[in-house]
Image: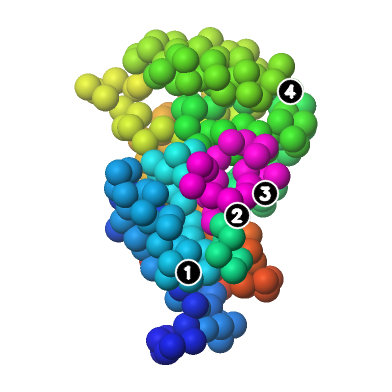
Amino acid sequence: MQITGQTKITGLFGDPVQYSLSPAMHNAAFKHLQLPYVYLPFPVDKSKLAAAVEAVRALKITGVNVTVPHKEAVIPYLDRLDRSAERCGAVNTIVNRDGVLTGYNTDGQGFIDALAEAGFTPAGKKVVILGAGGAARAVAAALIDQGAAEIMLINRTLQKAAALADFLGPQASYRQLIPHSKVEVAAVDLVVNTLSIPFRQEDQWLLDLTDARGALFYDLRYGKMPSDFLVLADELNSPRLDGLGMLLHQGARAFTLFTGQAAPVEVMRAALLQS
């Protein structure tokens, strides 16, 4: 990839970002389509978020993706929100158009795209979501928009789960995450883990999800080895997916927002699998 004075900069704001596969995915797509773009990871501390967003304007950066812990905190620093971000109250993509910064959310639809690829349809389904942060917001809102019947939110901070349930509407309920307790759910279809903490602690599972046996277990985390949450799915003989599909599809939608062109999804998938 040749860097010139015409190269357009895109990237990722978060903390940490050093292990993200987004740069490999986006740069492979730019190269394939011979576009004059580059995608860089930018480690952004919470205390520097406002300055980082202002730098998007000052440096005429084309756009950035936003990951933990900034998906909600970044909103006050933006000029506009697309409906996709308004719907869930979280931003994972910022696009700079002549100094006007617009926040989007491609996480939710990226998650739905990944489910569809796996043959799962949310309509009428009962879902448990572990966590209540920015990713959980996007996933929950997208599932409700696709017709999910019930969403149970389980989070360590009860007030945050309650606030999200109220934001989402009558399909959503909530309870506090109490380590090593049993989650009593009947006929749940999908369990989504958005937590960043280990799911196995002190030789015990963080939660007893025996009642969810047979549901699809979806971990938004990804890596070369199955996460502890996905190991639990195996123990329960339940189907499972990691977050690579969501990463791919949210990235493809962000790519189109950055460039105005259709994303080469299979090129991006190959880059993820090779990284």
What segment carries the magenta color? Answer: 75-94
Figure quadrant of the C terminus? bottom left
The image quarter in which residue 214 lies: top right
Q: Is the residue 86 above or below the residue 22 in the image?
A: above
Dot 4: element: loop
Q: How is the image coloured?
A: rainbow
Label 3 belongs to which residue?
Answer: 82
Within 10 Å of disc 3 (Cα), the crowding (few <14, some 14-19, many 20+) is few
Locate residue 219, reporting x and y percent. Answer: 47, 39
Within 10 Å of disc 2 (Cα), the crowding (few <14, some 14-19, many 20+) is many
Question: Could you tell me how far apart the alpha carbons at marks 2 and 1 are, in whole angstroms?
Answer: 13 Å
Choose the circle earlier in sequence order: 2 or 3.
3
Tell me which amino acid carries mark 1.
Ile
Label 4 belongs to which residue?
Answer: 149
Label 1 belongs to which residue?
Answer: 61
Locate residue 124, reporting x and y percent. Answer: 77, 27
Q: Nearer the viewer, residue 147 or 227?
A: 147
Question: Could you tell me how far apart the alpha carbons at marks 1 and 4 are, in whole angstroms?
Answer: 41 Å
Choose the circle earlier in sequence order: 3 or 1.
1
Dot 3: element: loop
Mark in front: 1 vs 4: 1
Tell me which amino acid carries mark 2.
Thr
Q: Nearer the viewer, residue 163 or 51?
A: 51
Locate residue 171, reporting x and y percent. Answer: 70, 19
